[in-house]
Amino acid sequence: MTKKYHFCSRNNVLLNIAGGLLVLSTLLSGCGVLPAFELKQENPMQTAISQELPVGEAVVMRDTKVPYSVPAGVSVLMYHMVGDEEGNAAVITEENFDKQMRYLKGHGYHPITMQELYDYVTKGSTLPEKPVCITFDDGYADNYTIVYPLMKKYGFPWTLYLITGEVGKPNRMTWEQLKEMAESHTVTIANHTVTHPKLGQLPSRLDKEKEIRGAQEALAKELGVHTTWISYPYGDYDQETMDICKELGIKLAVIMSDGRVHVNDNPLELHRVWVGNEVTLEHLEDRLHHDDYIKI
């Protein structure tokens, strides 16, 4: 069956479709929508994408029939671990996580990339109907073994904020796994510092810069990723932290305060919605649509 799709990325792309090559033109700024093209493939996320795309940036292709508008707000979902660990609020079972993703898919939600979120906040850019942003913090091993294949299954772009100093340790991903993910263009890999400190409480500006710059350099060296996105550990930051981020070319940061993201919010302190195992589908729906959602 032939479908038409919008394509969203930041650079030139080269697609290998059904054994032939199709070159798409350059997007001039940010994450835009190219003219629709014919794609004879049931799952567009399986299209081979060349190395011309920025490594570590997610790509999303959508049916051209999806309506776009400027929403009142966007929920940025915050996850950490997927598994069966008892008594840890940051852990969600694989069954519940799959159920939530299936719910989003079945109810017409459209996960967006960090670039799309940034353009919405700073420019008031349009987004697909029922937008949502999916993020994971830290870099646990289950993000590779469970989350990565599951998100490919649903065709959802997502963002991983990585603690670079934890890579290769027990229950964490390896650089080899991260490289595979970065080159898949299904996930955006971003900065979560080197050692996960409370940045706003570090004693000096130099200490803060070492954490942020160190993670930037590790991502570039190990993965070829040059990110402009960061998650402040514990949601802890101060004005000096934001100033350092600006100097290092980071233009969007997420925190842990409740609520949705809106046009003209400060892009260096965007709210997120906590999602753990106790969040039911009813709670999730509430968090997708309201700033003052029910706390549990």
Image (cartoon, grey):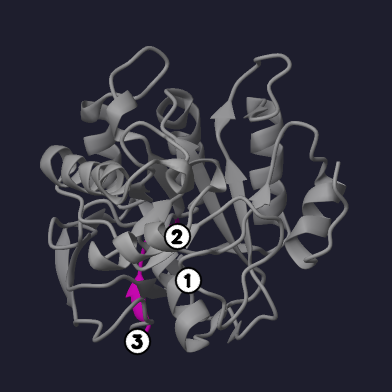
Above or below 233: residue 262: below
**Which residue has dot 2 on it?**
253
SS at circle 3: loop
Mark number, residue 173: none
| Mark 2 or 3, nearer chain start | 3
**Which residue has dot 1 on it?**
267
Q: Nearer the viewer, mark 2 or mark 3?
A: 2
| Mark 3 or 1, nearer chain start | 3
Real-space Cα separation, disc 2 to disc 1, in angstroms: 6 Å
| Mark 2 or 1, nearer chain start | 2
The x, y position of residue 197, in whole percent, is 43, 35
- 38 falls in the magenta region: yes
Looking at the rendered image, the quarter that the C terminus falls into is: top right
Residue 260 located left or right of residue 216: right
Report crowding for label 1: few under 14, some 14 to 19, many 20 or more residues within 10 A (C-alpha): many
Residue at (71%, 14%) from the top-left corner?
86
Real-space Cα separation, disc 3 to disc 1, in angstroms: 29 Å
Badge 3 amino acid:
Pro
Residue 278 located left or right of residue 193: right
Above or below 64: residue 83: above
SS at circle 2: strand
Q: Do labels 2 and 1 touch, CB within 8 Å?
A: yes
Badge 1 amino acid:
Pro
Residue 124 located left or right of residue 184: right
In this picture, which residue range is highlighted in magenta? Answer: 36-42
**Which residue has dot 3 on it?**
35
SS at circle 1: loop
Residue at (59%, 46%) from the top-left corner?
78
